[in-house]
Image (cartoon, grey):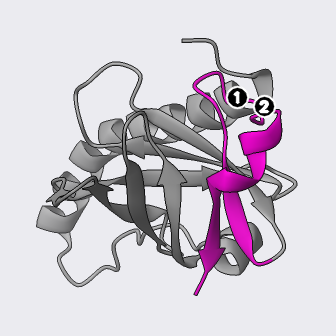
Amino acid sequence: MNINKPMLLVWSSVFLVTFLSACNKHEQRVAADAAPAEATASAPAPTANQIAIAGKYEGTLPGGDSSIKTIIQLNADGTYTSNETYVREKEFKQPEVKGLWLASKDGTNIALKSDSAVPGNIVCFGVVPGGIVKYDTSCKPIAGEQAAMYTLKKS
């Protein structure tokens, strides 16, 4: 999968922080055992972009032979849940997806990385007034007449 450089930088930073945090957990456990009354490290505070972008986004996206009712809940703590229902003659609800999301430094793009072990489990969106717009698999805006059909509105 081809990811644009800013999103690759964002995800690389997340994984570096996660790795360093995991290495540091052993030291925290030892310190907690030695001095249980001492305060332990808390989760990092959400960024201003995360607070501004966090919320519930809903809409119907185009699919191959169906449409896809989509609800994404972006939490300020950097977690998300996504629910999709494929609509044909009948509705087919997909399992809920959970994972982490990040905003670009300027707050114009976000990337969702699911907890799934499936390769290529990163989905990118552009942030627009009142919503988010799904990008293609290369994390680039979808062009053409269907571009407007990929918008989820903030509710």
x then y, percent, for residue 117: 22, 27
Instruction: Provide the residue designation for mark 1.
Output: 9
- Find residue 120 and report its image quarter: top left
CA gap, disc 2 and disc 1:
5 Å
| Relative side of 29 to 61, left or right | left
| Relative side of 90 to 154, left or right | left
x then y, percent, for residue 71: 41, 69
Which segment did they paint magenta? 130-155
> For residue 50, which numbered disc appears in the image?
none
- Find residue 145 and report its image quarter: top right
- At 58% from the left and 34% from the top, the residue drawn is 11
Q: Amino acid at mark 2?
A: Pro
- At 47% from the left and 74% from the top, the residue drawn is 75
Q: Nearer the viewer, residue 30 or 99?
A: 99
Q: Residue furthest front?
A: 89
The crowd level at tag 2 (other Cα within 10 Å; few <14, some 14-19, many 20+) is few
Quadrant of image for the C terminus: bottom right
Q: The residue tagged with tag 1: helix, strand or loop?
A: helix
x then y, percent, for residue 31: 24, 60
Contact flag, marks 2 and 1 (Cβ < 8 Å): yes
Q: Amino acid at mark 1?
A: Leu
Residue 41 against residue 36 in the figure, above or below? above
Q: Nearer the viewer, residue 106 or 144?
A: 144
Q: The residue tagged with tag 2: helix, strand or loop?
A: helix
Instruction: Provide the residue designation for mark 2.
Output: 6
The crowd level at tag 1 (other Cα within 10 Å; few <14, some 14-19, many 20+) is few
| Relative side of 125 to 155, left or right | right
Quadrant of image for the N terminus: top right
Q: Residue furthest left?
A: 33
Residue 56 against residue 65 in the figure, above or below? below
- At 68% from the left and 73% from the top, the residue drawn is 53
